[in-house]
Image (cartoon, helix red, strand yellow):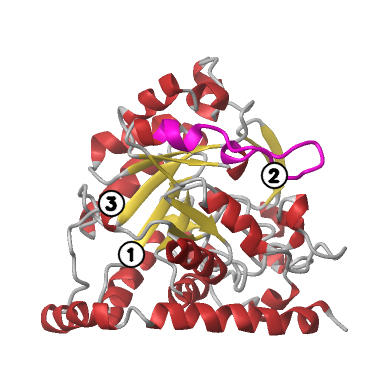
Amino acid sequence: MTQGERRTPARRTVLGAAGATVLGASTALAAGSAEAATTGRAPHRGHGYRSLPVPTVIGHRGASGYRPEHTLGSYRHALDLGAHVIEQDLVPTRDGHLVCRHENDITGTTDVADRPEFTARRTTKTVDGVALTGWFTEDFTLAELKTLRAKERIPGTRQENTLYDGRWTVPTFEEVLRWAEEEGRRRGREIWLHVETKHPSYFRSLGLALEERLAKLLRRYGRHRADSPVFLQSFEPSSIQRLAKLVDAPGVVLLSGASSRPWDFVEAGDPRTVADLVTPEGLRWIASYAQGIGPTLDLVIPKDASGRLGTPTTLVRDAHAEGLILHPYTHRNENTFLPADFRKGTDPTAYGDAFGALKRYLETGIDGIFSDNPDTALLAAADLTARG
């Protein structure tokens, strides 16, 4: 029996249950649908991020547990599953267009390695102190990049997703903005986006600064206001500070492991680590220019030496005390990504007790969560709400 055959029934159960949950909200969307039909534009409700459901479910790179990440197919499927917000990661092309890829290294997420006309583009670069060999978006014009096809990034874990290899191109962020407007009109509601600037210091050094390009697009599509349906996020605090001077959309500082340092801190000689930023003092500094943080889940509940969940930290309480929301990352259903105490069986690619793990995380009071499997996260959020 193959992996796909073993997991399909469970996956269908999750999808069906999530679909039923989402359909229950259809009546509330009727007024929005009427507005969209009358005006021809997606309705802008102007309530801001505090109006989102809590916990908010963010489709991580779309619905990347089911479709190749950062494709319009992945984004659309996340909406179909009921995700409240859809994430994009932005990197530039050589001619300055912003495209949606988790990394500028596109070796594993496109068919570029199979394209003989681009063989000579393979190179080694150092990005944020790490040497990488492959193909990079900044070495391609948009026209060249558009000849490539997207594919599954981790085919060994998500074999079923390879069915969709080659189906979609790499989307530009402007295409996603237009898509979000169209989906908003069709669904009668705002389509929220969670947009990350990737390696901003690196690209600024190449003359391909991300923030100004992003701000220009946000203004063009009316997503630059404080109540616009968009979050702006980055692992480099200075990128969020730059964006805060250009637009009023809410900013989120992403936080990696406690001992790590944001790359802009490394370049500036700032000795602070993430551990310093999650102290009350560090959070107060973040709150001076941002509205939220996106910590790794390990900063919310650390794991012990065996990989099992331990005792929650005070991060949720401390961040809320400074008025910050928390959108931790990343929930995934597969055993290999779950804490050791929520794995089932010995197959790392099989689904474990994702609901059990989500229950622990959501009970800490986080405001939302990034998920590769938004249908699972939505059901867990509904369970939490029902218990409350």
**Residue name at image x 45 percent, y 75 percent:** 76
**Residue beneath label 3, please?**
50
User: In this view of the protein, can residue 206 be seen by the observer?
Assistant: no
Q: CA distance from mark 3 to mark 2?
A: 29 Å
Q: Residue furthest front?
A: 387
**Residue name at image x 18 percent, y 64 percent:** 45
Question: Which three-letter amino acid code belongs to the residue tagged 3?
Answer: Arg
**Residue name at image x 71 percent, y 40 percent:** 303
Mark 3 or mark 1: whose residue is earlier in sequence = 3
Q: Position of residue 182 (x, y in %)?
A: 29, 76
Residue 253 shown left or right of residue 26 in the figure = right
Residue 214 shown left or right of residue 297 in the figure = left
Residue 254 shown left or right of residue 231 in the figure = right
**Residue beneath label 2, please?**
309
User: Around disc 3, counting alpha carbons within 10 Å, would you say few (fewer than 14), some (14 to 19), or many (20 or more)?
Assistant: few
Q: Where, quadrant-wise, is the C terminus in this rendering?
A: bottom left
For residue 225, above or below residue 114: above
Along the line of sight, which residue is nearer the eye, 51 or 260?
A: 51
Mark 3 or mark 2: whose residue is earlier in sequence = 3
Q: CA distance from mark 2 to mark 1?
A: 38 Å
The local secondary structure at tag 2 comes to loop
Question: Which three-letter amino acid code belongs to the residue tagged 2?
Answer: Leu
Q: Which residues are magenta?
A: 299-319
The numbered mark at residue 177 is 1
The numbered mark at residue 276 is none
Mark 2 or mark 1: whose residue is earlier in sequence = 1
The local secondary structure at tag 3 comes to helix
User: In this view of the protein, can residue 21 be seen by the observer?
Assistant: yes
